Amino acid sequence: MKRLGIFLALISIAGFCVVAQSTHTTDMNALVAAAQKEGQLTVIALPHSWVNYGEMIQRFHDKYGIQINELNPDGSSAEEIEAIKANKGNMGPQAPDVIDVGLSFGPKTVQEGLLAPYKVQTWNTIPANVKDSNGYWYGDYYGALAFEVNTDIIKDVPKDWSDLLKPEYKGQFALSGDPRISSQAQMTVVAAALSQGGSLRNITPGLKFFDKLNKVGNFVPLIAITGTVASGETPVTVVWDYNALADKDKLAGNPNIAVVIPASGVVAGIYIQGISAYAPHPNAARLWEEFLYSDEGQLIWLKGYGHPIRYADLARRGVVPADLAAKLPPASAYAKVVFPSLEDQEIETKAIVDGWDKVVNVNIQKQ
């Protein structure tokens, strides 16, 4: 049971603290009835392999009989928000009810009036500093960035960021998204910056690193996905540890995948949930959030290697299955992990959006 301490240690590193809140009660029978009357939930940018969302979606459907409409599974955080903006007043299938985006997108989305407040019944067990006090958004899970490497092609697996500059990786490395719009890709630039002597608020070394990576011919300007890693088109990428570990399970040795937490520049990132202020199915959206933040939903994320935001509460109550805890990476791999604050991420996002074209000047193409 020693590994049960991994996520508690990460929470301590992050400075998370659970602060008692007033009890939040919902008439669940009434909510279920209202959601079932609506009959549908529209989600966006939820690949089934991402923190086990495939099982999450299926279990929700099986439990409540609500159809789930899935939009743009491989979309970015920015594309999720744009989908809300583009579908204000649209009650059709292209309007998302809920979003799952990077932490840095939360405040701006609230300022623009795009989210509706709602506090789930387990609200008091979500750490206070990773949720909006009025319930407009709340952290759902987090992970640390890791190298995902196709070892059938790459025999000398990179152990740190500087390794990626070696000649043997020519035409081998790609980002998992466009840093101008993708949280995962933005945090990758931040991690590179830390490894190159930068800081959470000095991202220039990270941008210069990718400029150098491009100039030596190692950077492939394509968005890496599981298929391109497996095919060898982009055999090295950087993704959240839960995505890399899920890919390793999914590919099952065809090809073989190594998952490496780099020796330096170890960055963790939190994603958040929110309900669209223009949701066509507001009750189904609320029921979805209740399911995600229930013990059942949190353990589904854990099964997909995501670090669920309520892990401290789950561990204290002894409800984390031993077999799930045993599959987690060793705590020592996360000894140097850094959690950017919301303020850090706002500065980072602006620096990367403003600086990518100026410093790196590479357009990254979708598959």
Image: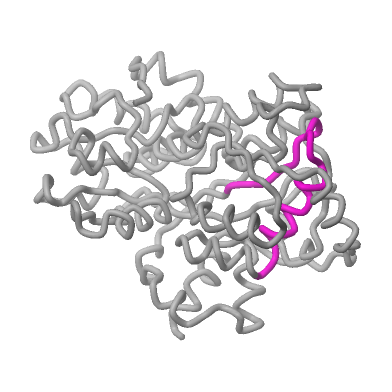
Residue 240 counted in the magenta span: no
Please identify the quarter of the rendering in which residue 361 is found: top left
89 displayed left or right of 163: right
Please identify the quarter of the rendering in which residue 279 is found: top right
Q: Nearer the viewer, residue 53 or 121?
A: 53
Residues shaded magenta: 271-295
Q: Is residue 66 above or below residue 123?
A: above
Q: Nearer the viewer, residue 293 or 139?
A: 293
59 displayed left or right of 228: right
Residue 288, horizontal then vertical, whole percent: 71, 52
Which part of the image, by quadrant, shows the C terminus? top left
Residue 237, horizontal then vertical, whole percent: 29, 41
Q: Which colour scheme is used?
A: one colour
Q: Which of 279 and 328 is in front in this view?
A: 279
Q: How many labels does the image show?
A: 0
Please identify the quarter of the rendering in which residue 92 is found: top right
Residue 20, horizontal then vertical, whole percent: 82, 68
Q: Which of 310 and 73 is in front in this view?
A: 73
Residue at the image position 46 percent from the left and 60 percent from the top? 304
Residue at the image position 29 percent from the left and 39 percent from the top? 227
89 displayed left or right of 202: right
Residue at the image position 50 percent from the left and 22 percent from the top? 353
Residue 318, horizontal then vertical, whole percent: 61, 84
Residue 293 counted in the magenta span: yes
Q: Is residue 220 above or below residue 51?
A: above
